[in-house]
Image (cartoon, helix red, strand yellow):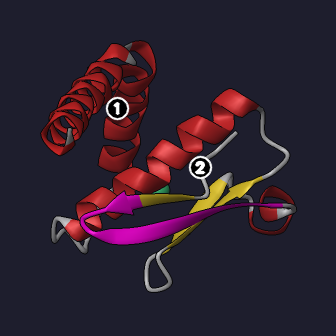
Amino acid sequence: MLPNNVKVGGVNYTVEEVPHLIADQELWGQILMRDAKIQIDSSLGVDRKRQTLIHELTHAIFLEAGYKDQDEDMINRVSIVLHQVLQDNPSLFHSAVHIAEKFTMKKLKKRERMKL
Ligand SMILES: [Zn+2]
């Protein structure tokens, strides 16, 4: 299951699965930069969809970082490794979310105590 949107550089990119992208344009996915929209062919398998999403997001990351002329080969290589790092290290982000939640809970408890 892909997310419906992903924020890159403060821009909300919508993600949608569409049929016939491969059949019509021989593309697994594409990014519509101006519309901040990423389309992924719905017939792909789950892993291929994620890999393709990360590829298109790498285009978005480079664009938002100011790289308008992008080398497809470089985007491809970076995105393959980025996909692997994100996939194989879920604790990177899980622990960050966990710490943020703990911090919020502490604050809420303190607020509750102050009310009493
Ligand atoms: Zn590309």
Instruction: Tell which of 116 and 16 is nearer to you.
Output: 116
Please identify the quarter of the rendering in which residue 48 is found: top right
The residue carrying pointer 1 sits among few (fewer than 14), some (14 to 19) or many (20 or more) residues within 10 Å by Cα, namely some
Q: Residue at x 34, y 32 (%)?
A: 82
Region in magenta: 7-18
Instruction: Tell which of 115 and 24 is nearer to you.
Output: 115
Give the farthest residue toward the front. Answer: 116
Disc ID at residue 1: none
Circle 1 is placed at which residue position?
A: 82
Instruction: Tell which of 54 and 95 is nearer to you.
Output: 95
Residue 95: percent from the left, percent from the top? 28, 19
Circle 2 is placed at which residue position?
A: 3
Residue 41: percent from the left, percent from the top? 75, 54
Circle 2: residue type: Pro
Q: Is residue 31 left or right of residue 71?
A: right
Q: Residue at x 36, y 51 (%)?
A: 58
Q: Give the mark toward the camera: 2 or 1.
A: 2
Instruction: Look at the picture and state if 78 lies above or below 21.
Output: above
Residue 73: percent from the left, percent from the top? 36, 47
Q: Secondary structure at mark 2?
A: loop
Q: Is residue 65 left or right of residue 79?
A: left
- Which quarter shows the C terminus? top left
17 part of magenta stretch: yes
36 part of magenta stretch: no
Spatial CA span between label 2 and label 1: 17 Å
- Which quarter shows the N terminus? top right
Q: Residue at x 50, y 84 (%)?
A: 35
Residue 87: percent from the left, percent from the top? 45, 21
Q: Is residue 51 left or right of residue 82?
A: right
The residue carrying pointer 2 sits among few (fewer than 14), some (14 to 19) or many (20 or more) residues within 10 Å by Cα, namely few
Instruction: Look at the picture and state if 57 lies above or below 70.
Output: above
Please identify the quarter of the rendering in which residue 22 is found: bottom right
